[in-house]
Structures are given as structure tokens and as C-alpha cells.
Image (tube, rainbow, N blue to C red):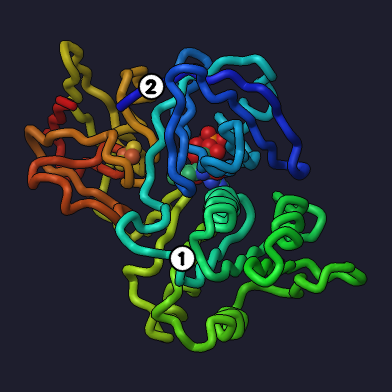
Amino acid sequence: MKLYTLKVTDIRQETQDSVTILFKQPGLKRIKYIAGQYLSLIFRINGRRYVRPYSFSSAPGVDETLNITVKRVPAGIVSNHIFDKLKIEDVLEVIEPMGDFVLPANTQTSDKHIYLWGAGSGITPLISIAKDALYGNKATSITLAYGNRDYENIIFSTVIEDLNKRFAGIFFPYHFITKPFVDIDNPNVVQGRITEKEIRDLLNGSQGNLKNTIHFICGPVGLKESIKSTLNELGVENSNIFSEDFEVIRNPKDFEDIITQNVLIKRGGESKTVEVTFGKSILEAGLDALMELSYSCQTGNCLVCKARIIKGDVRMIGVEKLPELLESDECLLCSSFPVSDNVEISIEY
Ligand SMILES: Cc1cc2nc3c(=O)[nH]c(=O)nc-3n(C[C@H](O)[C@H](O)[C@H](O)COP(=O)(O)OP(=O)(O)OC[C@H]3O[C@@H](n4cnc5c(N)ncnc54)[C@H](O)[C@@H]3O)c2cc1C
Ligand code: FES
């Protein structure tokens, strides 16, 4: 896992509660990334180390700077720190780009229709993919269905408008606005949510040739589920559907038999018994105990928090991808919860 330091060259207010941070590409060690990937920012706040992934909103080969766009989360530690404390010229430590929410590497996409489905801050990786595919001639057409509460708070509304003009006949953006409105002078605005009917209507744009479509979804769980199930009903294969989650919503039922337990965590020469209170992951408990544990996504995707279970029983909850890449005695600490009282974990990676 490579670490870099990046300097903030600009901070742009996108909407009331979202900002884009522009970083200068390092002169020598330039950072390579793929549209749709994310950068993990490292902060030290009140003596504790925090890592948070943010999808690139820039696209390689299109934007000079490395851009991320952050939405303020109520009571969120890092997003509020970025809003209230980060300044131009600040230098941040970051973890190399990661993530598989990208155009498939071994598939020719230039004859495909790409559909981008998103809501709110979920637009960030989608705009990166849109710019990359449009400027790089990587698709026949690109449809963007983007949901927001109101028209005034659409992130990247100007960028989307510019792409619409520049790539007329190839790029088809639609804004779905849930708050009732009157008099918006934009033919691409639709009143309401992205419903099953709207999904089906938009897919008619591919003239029924759904085999030639690729779909990227980034937004709340409900949106992802409804788009996926409609696409599946219409015969789109899962191999052509990609999704990115900014946070994991776990099912409370999975926690029914979990109670507060002590867990022994061994890392290098350090060894600490931490109390994993009900609902917290072993990773969170270790970080709260000020252990320097490696992590990034906290959604069970990046494998950075992989650890070996030496003793006891651990349950992984909410991990959708990659468990097959783990050995039977391995777990991802960000998604692991102790289910016995003698758990011992060793971090060797
Ligand atoms: C792969 C990936 C890419 C991401 N890309 C972006 C991005 O481009 N832009 C962006 O703004 N965020 C993005 N995120 C989310 C980001 O990493 C942080 O989780 C988010 O900024 C909240 O961090 P925090 O420290 O402010 O909140 P925390 O202090 O960690 O959490 C505070 C509370 O907010 C809830 N919460 C956590 N994350 C979210 C969220 N995303 N939305 C609503 N509530 C939340 C938590 O459940 C908790 O209750 C991404 C996450 C992942 C996994
Ligand atoms: S932090 Fe990414 S899988 Fe755990």
C-alpha cells in the first residue's frame, strides 16, 4: 500500500453542503488512477488517526488536478473537519488510489451504451467515469440519471450542462428532483424519484439492445436495489452492473446474538485487549483504543484491514464483495464482530 503527500491547490464550494478539493499532482511521483476509483485521505484529529475514502471527481487525462468532492455528513468527524479546517496549501497524506468501480479492463466498451445511476454525493465517481468515457470515446452513448432533493443543490450542475452541450447526441443527462418545483428552464429535469417506470423508460434509449449496456450505480441502498432488480428483470446480467457503496447499512437482525466482548489484538510488537462494545466493529474498537490499525474503505471492499483469527469466533457482517479472497481463518476487521468471549486477532499484513 503506497502513501503519498498531496498539496491542496484549491477548494471550491459546489453546493451549500458539498466542496471539491483540488490537489496538485506530485511533480515526480505522479499518481495514476482509473476513473471511478477513490483516494483515501488520512487525518489526525484529536490524537486519533482517521482514514476516509473519497471518489475522484476528476478524470485522468481530462483534469490536471486530482479532485475529490466531499459532502458534509451531520456529526461526521472527517467531513466536518474538511469543511471547517482544511485550507489551500495544506499538505495531506493519502493512500494510493483503489477501487473496482471502473470500466471493465478487458472489455471493449466503445460500442456500448453506459448508464450512470446516482443520487446526491453518489455523483462523484459517476462524473469521473462520464468525463473519462466521453473525452476518451469509450462509449456510443452515456445516459446519466441523477436524483436530488432540489434543483439548487445539484452537485456539478454546470459541469453536467457543459458536457451536455459539448457531447450533444452522445451524453443524455436527466435530473430527478423530488421537491416540487415550478418553472425550471431545463428540459432534462424530471419531477420525482428514479422509479421503476423511469428506469424502464430510460432503457428504451438503448433501443432494446440491453446486452450492449453497462451500468454504474452509486447512491443510497434503496436506489441501488431498485435499479439492480429492474435491470435484472429486463435481462441485464450482473456482470454488466457495477455499484459503489459509500457506507454499509447493516441489518440489525445480524446482531441479535452479539454482545460486548473483549478482543485481544496483536500487531507487530503491540498487543492490546480492547472492549468491543455492542454494534462496534473490531476495527473501530481498536482505533478507539488508539491502536494504529490499517484500513481504508470500511465497507469490506479494499481488504486493507485483513487479519488472522487466532482464537475464538468472529462474524463478518455486511460484506458483499471479495470474501472468496480470504482464507478460512482470515477476516476483515472493519466488518468483523466477536461472537465468543475469547477472540484473539493477529495482524500480519
Ligand atoms: C468507496 C467510497 C467512496 C466514497 N466517496 C465519497 C465521496 O466521493 N464523497 C463523499 O462525500 N463521501 C464519500 N464517501 C464517504 C466518506 O468516506 C465518509 O464516510 C463520509 O465523508 C463520512 O465520514 P465522516 O468522518 O464525516 O463521518 P463519520 O464520523 O464516520 O460518521 C458519522 C455518522 O454519519 C454516518 N455516515 C457515514 N458515512 C456516511 C455517508 N456517506 N452518508 C451519510 N451518512 C454517513 C455514519 O453512519 C455515522 O452515523 C465514500 C466512501 C466510500 C466507502
Ligand atoms: S477497511 Fe476496506 S475492507 Fe476493511
Residue highlighted by disc 2: 3
> Which of the 4 image quarters holds residue 75?
top right
Three-letter residue code for mark 1: Ser
- Local SS, label 1: loop
Say which quadrant the N terminus sits in.
Answer: top left
The crowding category of the residue bearing disc 1, from other C-alpha atoms within 10 Å (few below 14, some 14 to 19, many at least 20), is some
Whole-number angstrom distance, CA of label 1 to CA of label 2: 34 Å
Q: Are marks 1 and 2 in contact (CB under 8 Å)?
A: no
Can you say whether 347 is above or below 57 in the image? above
Residue 212, disc: none
Amino acid type at circle 2 is Leu
- Residue 211 in percent (x, y) is at 39, 80
The quarter of the image holding the C terminus is top left
Q: Is residue 100 above or below residue 106?
A: above
Q: Residue furthest bottom?
A: 208
Q: Measuring from the top left, give residue 29's x and y in whole percent.
A: 43, 20
Q: Residue at x 61, y 38 (%)?
A: 63
Which of discs 1 and 2 lies nearer the camera? The answer is 1
Q: Is residue 18 above or below residue 262?
A: below
Residue 215 x, y percent position in the rendering: 46, 67
245 with respect to 186 (left or right):
left
Secondary structure under tag 2 reads strand
Which x, y percent locates residue 323?
20, 52
Number of numbered discs: 2
The part of the image, by quadrant, that contains residue 187 is: bottom right
**Viewer-nearest residue: 180 or 259:** 180
Which residue is identified by label 1? 110
Q: Nearer the viewer, residue 162 or 81?
A: 162
Which residue is at 34% across, 31% downward?
A: 295
